[in-house]
Image: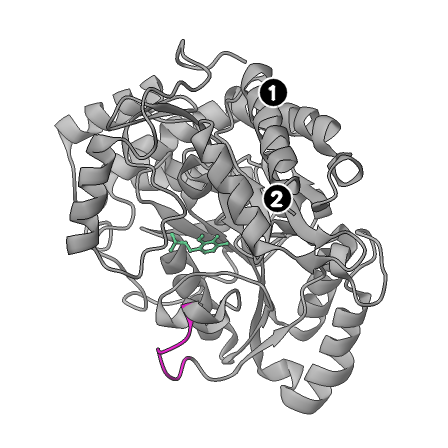
Amino acid sequence: MQTTVEVKTPHLVTALPGPKAQQVIAADDKFMSPSLTREYALVAKKGRGAIVEDVDGNSFLDFAAGIAVCSTGHCHPKVVEAIQKQAAELIHISGTDFYHHHLPQLAEKLAATLPGKDAKKVFFGNSGTEAVEGAIKLARYHTKRDKLIAFYGCFHGRTLGSLSLTASKNTQRKGFGALLGGVEHIPFPYAYRCPHGHSSETCGTETLELLEQQLFKRLFAPEEIAAIIVEPIQGEGGFIPAPAFFLQELQRICNRHGIMLIVDEVQSGVGRTGKWWAYEHAGIEPDIVCIAKGIASGMPLSAFVAKESVMTWKKGSHGTTYGGNPVCIASAMATLDLIENGYMENARKMGDYIFSRIGDWPKRFRIVGDVRGKGLMIGIEIVRDQKTKEKAADLRDTVISKAFHKGLLTLSSGENSIRMSPPLLIDEEQAGFAIRTLEECLRETEKTI
Ligand SMILES: Cc1ncc(COP(=O)(O)O)c(C=O)c1O
């Protein structure tokens, strides 16, 4: 797979952060909201392919992709061209009030990527949280029920509706008072820490029992539940895949009780796992699918796609000023073409390649507890001791920081995991650099304990 640039690996020319980066960070400290959580001092200036250059001329290999957003890499020429062309023609016309040929064009293309015979309808928004808000509203409207079930460890966004579902870190909820009522959380199948000793294929059996035998009987009658919302691979929660059987059983339970199954593909979707949607690995057909991040290569666009039989709301029930902005849609059209014509297959191949080289890390590094994921959504869980599985957030942070100082951008995920979520166009040379760099960082970090 060819990347779109000649420079494929990083090059550092200053100590980090460099002098210009320090100036930006000082200004940022003065004027920006202190709620933002910067993991290290990257001050980005340019991006091409999987390479990001900072304000001091240091270049980095980007295995974070702007939190799994830059699916086609940074500034892919075809994406840039589509954006520029559209920006010169029409930047905005609100899709709530007016028509625009791009809207049904992208809706049709997107709907065609979802498996199943049911006709689909699409609503465009601007961010992941907005897709989730819309999905909650649609599920409530369609079912005329209000209760919602989500999972511990899940992340669905930070606006008040989606935050009511999010159960990732208490700092994300603390201080904001009462959230939506009628929301319950149940354990997510986390095979590495399965309290019942199940494998990654069978973990979750007890959660399903809890749902049917306890929650349905003691808290919410199933006929009161509007939706169960699930990430097929928990993203912010630690890159934890749900077993296929678990998603299939959830679907069966939802179908039996007329509950909407909402699958949140905001982080796992758009080809990242080697299929359009991570839930396809389980062969299910959710009622509503939430999409954002990778869909438009960095332009703010999200969508939720529902079965036509579910998107039954009436004129005026839901709308948006910017959602489906023509420039974002042009970017998405170019993005989906690129994903379809090579990058999705590359994500599968490169994912297999990376797993073949790092699958034995738990044997080779005593601080690696688990390596998991699918395609280019790869989580590495860092522990202090493999036997006790004590979570080692400090060691994880050290590895991430060391990687940054060697020119590799990664992100944390969950309490003590590292995530690799590079653009889908990376090649073996880049994967090899990332693997070697992380190995060095793990080795160095091990020596500190
Ligand atoms: C699975 C999932 N859902 C929803 C969101 C919220 O998306 P946004 O930050 O665009 O609102 C995220 C963000 O990380 C996510 O990972």
Q: Is residue 275 visible from the viewing direction of this image?
A: no
**Quarter-wise, where is residue 254 in the image?**
bottom right
Lower sequence index among marks 2 and 1: 1
Disc 1 within 8 angstroms of ligand 1 (CB)? no
Residue that label 1 marks: 432
Residue at the farthest bottom position? 218
Residue 263 in picture, x, y percent from top left: 56, 56
Q: Which residue is drawn at the image coordinates 28% and 36% (left, top)? A: 43
Q: Position of residue 309 (x, y in %)?
A: 52, 60
Segment colored magenta: 172-179
Of marks 2 and 1, the one in the foreground: 2
| Image quadrant assignment for residue 393 | bottom right
Q: Are marks 2 and 1 in contact (CB under 8 Å)?
A: no
Residue 181, position in %: x, y? 46, 84
Q: Quadrant of residue 342?
A: top right
370 up-or-down from 315: above or below: above
Q: Is residue 178 magenta?
A: yes
The residue sitting at 36% across, 83% down in the picture is 177
Q: Residues within 10 Å of mark 2 (few under 14, many from 20)?
A: few
Of the residues shown, which amino acid type is indicated by label 1? Gly
* Front one among 217 and 190: 190
Is 114 placed left or right of 294 in the picture? right
384 over 164 or under it: above or below: above
The amino acid sitting under disc 2 is Thr
Identity of the residue drawn at 72% across and 76% down? 211
Quarter of the picture containing the N terminus is: top right
At 70% from the left and 83% from the top, the residue drawn is 216
Q: Is residue 201 visible?
A: yes
Q: Residue furthest top?
A: 6
Is residue 72 shown in magenta? Answer: no
Looking at the rendered structure, which numbered label has been put on residue 448? 2
